Image (spheres, rainbow, N blue to C red):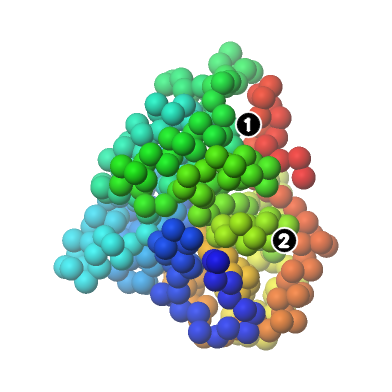
């Protein structure tokens, strides 16, 4: 089973890893690169590796910054002069919706490998449970001024999964998983899988703590990775203070008691739930702050109070209109 960290565990460190059912293991804290400002990713990746001990980096083909991530990794490995090796790092990237056709899956991973300047990927995820038609001039497969979305209508999740398994056979990737999948979609894969998914990466934060999905994944020996872990995704015309758990009075109070920032409290909450967490930043100060979470622990009461926010402030931020007929949100809850 994926080892779960009890709430009172004080032995977490930056080197803490979770072991998958395929025996590969993944660091518990990493750096996310979604919505990272272009031009800043390369430096922050290099800095994270060389000066802050980060080993997990999460990216995706659609973020259009894999080349920056790759350059940052390459520079760090060179500058470390052998102190950090490729096998010390854990790199996740994701198969985009346009590449679900079995014949496109290998092309997609090879394209990511080229940009990342790597010869294998540690973890490859199906980014969304929906297959767009592969058209070269629009990543979102939209035509007619974005009115129509085109789908690869005959491609099932099972078809795509079987192509993902072949990437493991070919040693292009070490482990495979999913992202933004619900329970029935994971069940669809489990029914046919020769190699079972090791991870489901989902939006998860104090305002949307995904208790049911966490329980389901634990039963199926699937590790959960939290994206948007600080819920700092305000809508247009919305104040950051109204959207993000970073400004929540309960979390502010706990932070004050512990002499920590609210970000540190939230990241610690994820880790004590046994989750992998990938906060995004492009500033060295925040990089250091996010990793400085190993000299304190949250009590059971602290954990309960933060868990409670999932009921009082429940909110999903990421719900794109990807489903047929072309404008239907992916999630209905």
Q: For the point 61% across and 57% down, which residue is it?
A: 220
Image position of 322 (left or right of 283): right
Callout 2: SS: helix
Callout 1: SS: loop
Mark identifier at residue 211: 2
Would you place residue 248 above or below residue 75 in this image? Answer: below
- Mark 1 packing: few (<14 Cα in 10 Å), some, or many (20+)? many
**Quadrant location, the N terminus:** bottom right
Image coords of residue 21 (percent x, y):
48, 60
User: In front: 256, or 273?
Assistant: 273
Residue of label 1: 322
Q: Kindly report the distance in space between the C-alpha atoms of the residues bearing marks 2 and 1.
A: 24 Å
**Quadrant location, the C terminus:** top right
Q: For the point 67% across and 37% down, which residue is it?
A: 330
- Res. 87 in view: yes
Q: Residue furthest right?
A: 312
Image coords of residue 300 (percent x, y):
71, 82
């Amino acid at each position: 089973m994926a080892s779960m960290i009890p709430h009172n565990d004080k032995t977490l460190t930056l080197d803490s890893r979770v072991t998958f059912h395929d025996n590969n293991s993944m660091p518990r804290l990493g750096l996310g690169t979604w919505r990272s400002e272009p031009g800043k990713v390369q430096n922050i990746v290099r800095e994270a590796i060389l000066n802050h001990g980060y080993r997990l980096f999460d990216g995706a083909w659609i973020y259009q910054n894999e080349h920056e991530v790759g350059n940052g990794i390459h520079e760090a490995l060179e500058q470390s002069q052998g102190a950090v090796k490729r096998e010390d790092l854990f790199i996740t990237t994701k198969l985009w919706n346009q590449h679900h056709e079995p014949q496109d899956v290998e092309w997609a991973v090879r394209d990511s490998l080229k940009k990342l300047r790597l010869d294998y990927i540690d973890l490859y995820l199906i980014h969304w449970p929906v297959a767009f038609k592969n058209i070269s001039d629009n990543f979102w497969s939209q035509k007619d001024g974005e009115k129509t979305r085109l789908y690869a209508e005959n491609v099932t999740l099972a078809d795509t999964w079987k192509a993902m398994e072949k990437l493991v056979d070919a040693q292009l990737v070490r482990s495979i998983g999913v992202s933004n999948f619900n329970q029935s979609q994971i069940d669809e894969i489990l029914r046919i899988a020769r190699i079972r998914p090791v991870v489901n990466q989902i939006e998860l934060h104090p305002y949307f703590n995904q208790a049911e999905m966490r329980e389901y994944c634990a039963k199926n020996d699937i590790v959960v990775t939290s994206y948007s872990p600080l819920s700092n995704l305000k809508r247009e015309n919305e104040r950051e203070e109204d959207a993000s758990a970073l400004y929540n009075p309960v979390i502010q109070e706990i932070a004050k008691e512990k002499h920590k920032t609210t970000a540190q409290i939230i990241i610690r909450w994820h880790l004590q739930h046994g989750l992998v967490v990938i906060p995004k930043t492009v500033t060295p100060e925040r990089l250091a702050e996010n990793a400085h979470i190993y000299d304190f622990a949250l009590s059971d009461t602290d954990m309960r109070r933060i868990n409670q926010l999932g009921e009082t402030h429940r909110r999903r931020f990421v719900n794109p209109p990807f489903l047929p007929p072309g404008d239907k949100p992916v999630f209905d809850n």
